[in-house]
Image (cartoon, rainbow, N blue to C red):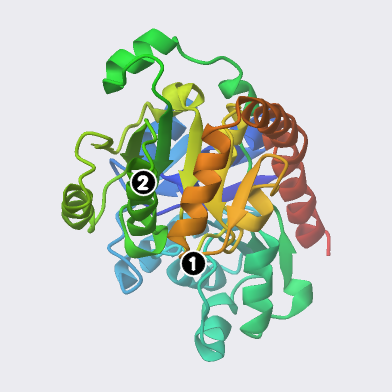
């Protein structure tokens, strides 16, 4: 099959990383893939490094009609069998229009679980034969917005479990992040934006400190709340316990060295960061929100607590920090579950089956 993929995100966050996984897997299966993405974007360099054919088209967002025109021209020139749009920023609305103008069937991936008005959803998804939800939670949101059930299919995001099979050297890790030997290391990773819930994590960390717990917490990411979160940490007296290393493109190398991964998101399509942590053998504590209820097996690979409940979050963190055997059991179960249920091969095979069902309909 000849498939044109459209991903307009600027950074190689969870969504674009999934596109990179899919492109590599489809190419390995002999399919002809081309990626349309903005020049200089994170996935641009990642795809080129994998030998994927790339066409750079700048996209300024959902209202960038010249992007839709240029994309329509490119589709007409290359005549793919199918167009797969991946991101919301320009790719879904404008990508769908471009595929329609070129009379090529198209599908779109939906990665977020926020609700939509029925009218907006109807317009957004009208051009697409299928809407791919990365979790059952998102599928429910789509159906609630009026998208016909037979147009919605669930294909969960994947994690490259083999890439996390080996943990970096512990001493090097502690030097890198200035963490004393013997002190538990906790991590959180995600954009520093309201729905990621970092303010609740800082409140939970303050509770652990008040109870005399020794730990270091690394909050990875960038975003609009960077200054506010740093100020909150300072006001809670956490300057000596919490670090904000920013966005690290080498986080995958270090993630297996942490004792605990905490993900306090209030809304989440699935939670790729938690998949990576579990693949690396790191137990997860998270809010029971959105797709996190599918990503983390509560009581098996981690602990889920009610959203916005800092007390419950602190309690779950303390429980795992105090129980080495429980952490080890969760770690082993997380590795096994990621390898069996969230593999790239499974994700790619399901996409191929979906593409073929559309083209042979």
Q: Quadrant of residue 178?
A: top left
Above/below status of 220 relative to 249: below
Q: Residue at x 57, y 37 (%)?
A: 320
Along the line of sight, which residue is nearer the eye, 73 or 213? 213
Q: Secondary structure at mark 2?
A: helix
Residue 237: numbered disc: none
Say whether residue 359 is left or right of residue 113.
right
Quadrant of image for the N terminus: top right
Q: Secondary structure at mark 1?
A: loop
Above or below 311: residue 177: above
The residue shown at (30%, 44%) is 39
What residue sits right under mark 1 in the picture? Answer: 92
Q: Earlier in the sequence, mark 1 or mark 2?
A: 1
Looking at the rendered image, the disc whose residue lies closer to the viewer, 1 or 2, is 2
Residue 30 in view (yes/no): no
Distance, label 1 to label 2, CA atoms, is 39 Å
Examine the rendered structure and indicate whether residue 301 appears above or below residue 37.
above
Q: Is residue 215 above or below residue 17?
A: above
Q: Is residue 204 visible?
A: yes
| CA neighbours of label 1 inside 10 A, class few (<14), some (14 to 19), many (20+) | many
Query: Residue beneath label 2, please?
Result: 205
Is 160 in front, or is 235? 235
**Residue 27 percent across, percent down from the top left:** 63, 33
What residue lies at 33% left-to-right and 58% top-to-bottom? 199
Residue 324, percent across and down?
Answer: 60, 25
């Amino acid at each position: 099959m000849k498939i044109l993929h459209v991903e307009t995100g600027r950074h190689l966050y969870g969504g674009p990383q999934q596109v990179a996984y899919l492109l590599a897997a489809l190419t390995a299966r002999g399919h002809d893939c081309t990626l349309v993405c903005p020049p200089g974007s994170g996935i641009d360099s990642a795809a080129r490094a994998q030998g994927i054919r790339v066409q750079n088209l700048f996209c300024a967002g959902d209202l960038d009609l010249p992007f839709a025109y240029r994309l329509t021209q490119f589709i007409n020139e290359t005549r793919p069998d199918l167009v797969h749009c991946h991101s919301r920023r320009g790719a879904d609305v404008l990508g769908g229009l471009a595929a329609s103008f070129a009379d090529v069937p198209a599908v779109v991936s939906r990665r977020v679980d926020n609700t939509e008005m029925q009218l907006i959803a109807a317009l957004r998804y009208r051009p697409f034969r299928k809407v791919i939800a990365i979790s059952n939670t998102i599928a429910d949101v789509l159906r609630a917005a009026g998208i016909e059930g037979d147009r919605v299919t669930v294909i969960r995001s994947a994690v490259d479990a083999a890439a996390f099979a080996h943990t970096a050297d512990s001493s090097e890790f502690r030097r890198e992040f200035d963490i004393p030997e013997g002190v538990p290391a906790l991590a959180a990773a995600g954009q520093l934006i309201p729905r990621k819930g970092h303010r609740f994590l800082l409140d939970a960390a303050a509770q652990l400190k008040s109870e005399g717990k020794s730990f270091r917490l690394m909050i990875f990411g960038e975003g609009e709340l960077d200054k506010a979160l740093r100020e909150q940490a300072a006001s809670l007296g956490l300057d000596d316990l919490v670090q904000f290393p920013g966005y690290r493109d080498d986080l995958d190398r270090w993630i297996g060295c942490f004792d605990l991964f905490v993900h306090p998101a209030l809304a989440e399509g699935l939670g790729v960061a938690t998949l990576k942590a579990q693949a690396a053998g790191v137990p997860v504590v998270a809010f029971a929100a959105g797709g996190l209820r599918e990503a983390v097996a509560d009581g098996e690979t981690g602990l889920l607590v009610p959203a916005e409940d800092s007390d419950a979050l602190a309690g779950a963190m303390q429980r795992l920090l105090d129980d080495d055997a429980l952490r080890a059991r969760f770690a082993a179960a997380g590795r096994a579950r990621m390898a069996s249920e969230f593999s790239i091969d499974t994700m790619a095979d399901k996409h191929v089956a979906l593409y073929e069902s559309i083209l042979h309909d």
